[in-house]
Amino acid sequence: MKNRLSKTTKLGCALAPINITVGALLIYVVLAIFLGSFGDAFSFIAFSVICTLGVSLILWIPACYVVGYLPVLLFRLLMTASSKSDTGTRPAASKKKTLQALSDRLKADSATGGLEPTHDQQALLDYVDKASLKGLSREQITSNLRQNGWNMDSINWAFNFVKSGGGA
């Protein structure tokens, strides 16, 4: 997660000049439309910066970044989508296939312990195993787990896993 955040931050910093430039152009054009001419739009921006001794740049620069962010993002998404369609890959379909394969593998390996359970799954397995050893009935264990937010599929999976000898 930290690595992905770092990459996103680096990309954001690298694209900031582009976002600001695109945003400044868009704001300039919109001001020209509302004020009547490009000269009036330039005068408005120049006077706002000069008369405030540059303090208005505290508003202009972030405004340009925010206004420019969306077009740059849309352009990047279009380029990414077109490059993926050019190579013939379908990201949604391949992702669905990958998730289906992982789901099938989990189902196939759950009884044999082919995959390591997640932290939550291990906690569930430990609880089912220890509660069974204490003599609690399946119904009591299920009721306790349901009260704590576990769904029936997870509970049944845990019972089957412990019963098969794959549990803690």
Image (cartoon, rainbow, N blue to C red):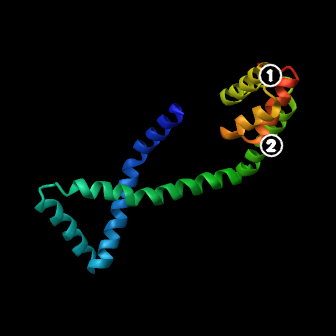
What's the residue type where badge 2 is placed?
Gln
What's the residue type where badge 1 is placed?
Gly
Left or right of 98? Residue 13 is left
Picture quarter with the C terminus: top right
Report the residue at 50% width, 32% height from top.
2
Q: Nearer the viewer, mark 1 or mark 2?
A: 1
Q: Position of residue 142 (x, y in %)?
A: 77, 36
Q: Position of residue 110 (x, y in %)?
A: 83, 29
Report the residue at 86% width, 20% height from top.
165
Answer yes or no: is residue 106 visible: no
Residue 100: assigned label: 2
Q: Quadrant of residue 123?
A: top right
Picture quarter with the N terminus: top right
Query: Do callouts 1 and 2 mark residues in contact (Cβ within 8 Å)?
Result: no
Q: Earlier in the sequence, mark 1 or mark 2?
A: 2
Label 1 residue SS = loop
Q: Quadrant of residue 121?
A: top right
Task: Classify mark 2: residues with Cα within 10 Å, few (<14), some (14-19) or many (20+).
Answer: few
- The answer for how far apart the CA atoms under marks 1 and 2 are is 37 Å
Q: Quadrant of residue 38?
A: bottom left
Relative to 165, does residue 37 appear above or below in the rendering? Answer: below
Report the residue at 71% width, 49% height from top.
91
**Label 1 belongs to which residue?**
135
Left or right of 163? Residue 91 is left
Report the residue at 40% width, 58% height from top.
68
Residue at the bottom extreme, as displayed: 36
Label 2 residue SS = helix
The mark total stands at: 2
